[in-house]
Every structure is written in C-alpha cells, then in structure tokens.
Amino acid sequence: MNTLILAGHLGADPEVRFTSSGQKVTTLRLATKTRKGSSGEDTIWWRVTVWGEQFDKMISYLKKGSSVVVVGEMSKPEMFTDKNGNTQISMSMTASQIQFSPFGRGGSQNNQGGSRDESFQENPHAGVSVGEMQNFSSDQSSSMDDEIPF
C-alpha cells in the first residue's frame, strides 16, 4: 500500500456525486507545491476521492482555497493529453483521513468555536497529528497559480 500525506489548498469546491448503486463519492481537487531549488515552485494537482459519508460534517466547511491535510492511499499515476496537446500526469488518491490544516494562508486561523489555538500560531512548523482532527479554518483565497488539469 502507498500511504501518502498531502498538505495543500483546494482548487475548487468539493464535488459530490453518487454511484449507480447510491454510494456517495466526494472529489477534492488539491494543489500542492514542490520546491525546485532556486528556480521557484511547481504546483502538483491531486484528485482526492472520499467514499461514503465519513467526512460529511467537515467537507461542508471546505471550499475553494481551503487549506487541508489529507492522508490516504495513492493510486497509480495516469497520463493524459491536455487541451494544448501536452502530455500531463494525473495524480490521485483515496482519502482515509482529512484535517483542516494549521498552515493556512493569512493570520486568522480560528477553530470552530472562535477561540485561537496559540500552539499553532507560535510554531507554525509544528508537526500535524494525523490521528487527530484539528478544527481550523483559514483565510480563503480564490486565486490559484495554475489551471486544474482535470
């Protein structure tokens, strides 16, 4: 099994669909950044699939620009040709855990109750506990650098 932990921002609002058998499937489009040395950053887009209703309460708070941490199983990358004829790679995973990220944009990282969790404010590089869900929200930004490839 390929377990992966991704931290990034949603490039679109979550999309909810149902299979022909009635099972709920939610798709998140997640942008992650990779550093390329002195030449800057690249954005890698991930399609994150959430099966069933296990994260419904949390997903209702997510929208384009939300910062999240997702843990799940990586699927085999697929190649496709974009509208300009360039070969691209589609990355995808099936989520087993989703958390609000404490590393959101801006300085207003309040939890659901409205009080501040100072431990993440003082040390923004502290580790994120995968087993615990942190109820953080961040400033929402609708501007993304790159186009969603799927």
Image: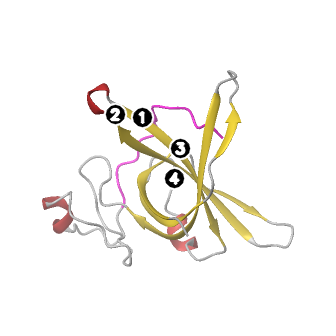
First-in-chain label (3 vs 4): 3
Q: Locate the N terminus and report the quarter of the image it occupies.
A: bottom right
Place of residue 133 in the rendered image (x, y in percent of width and height, measured from the top left): 39, 74
**In the displayed structure image, the side of residue 120 where residue 71 appears, left or right:** right
Label 4 environment density (alpha carbons within 10 Å; few <14, some 14–19, many ≥20): some
Main SS of the magenta part reads loop
Q: Nearer the viewer, mark 3 or mark 4?
A: 3
At a point 25% along the width and 66% down the height, the residue shown is: 127
Circle 4 residue:
63
Residue 115, image x, y percentages:
24, 69
Which quadrant is home to the C terminus?
A: top right
Q: Which residue is mark 1?
A: 42
The residue at 42%/67% (across/down) is 99
Mark 2, secondary structure of its residue = loop
Q: Is the residue under label 1 in contact with that under label 2 (CB below 8 Å)?
A: yes
Residue ranking furthest to the right: 20
Along the polypeptide, which appears first: circle 3 or circle 2? 2
Q: Judging from the image, what secondary structure is the residue with disc 3 in? A: strand
Highlighted magenta segment, given as a residue range: 137-150
Name which residue type carries label 1: Asp
Q: Residues within 10 Å of mark 1 (few under 14, many from 20)?
A: some
Q: Nearer the viewer, mark 4 or mark 2?
A: 2
Q: Please, what secondary structure does the residue beneath circle 4 have? A: loop
Nearer to the camera, 132 or 142: 132
- Label 2 or label 1, whichever comes before in sequence order: 2
Question: Distance of mark 3 from mark 4, alpha carbons?
Answer: 16 Å
The residue positioned 15% from the left and 60% from the top of the image is 123
Q: CA distance from mark 1 to mark 4?
A: 22 Å
Q: Earlier in the sequence, mark 4 or mark 2?
A: 2
Q: How did the renderer colour the structure?
A: secondary structure
Q: Which residue is mark 3?
A: 45
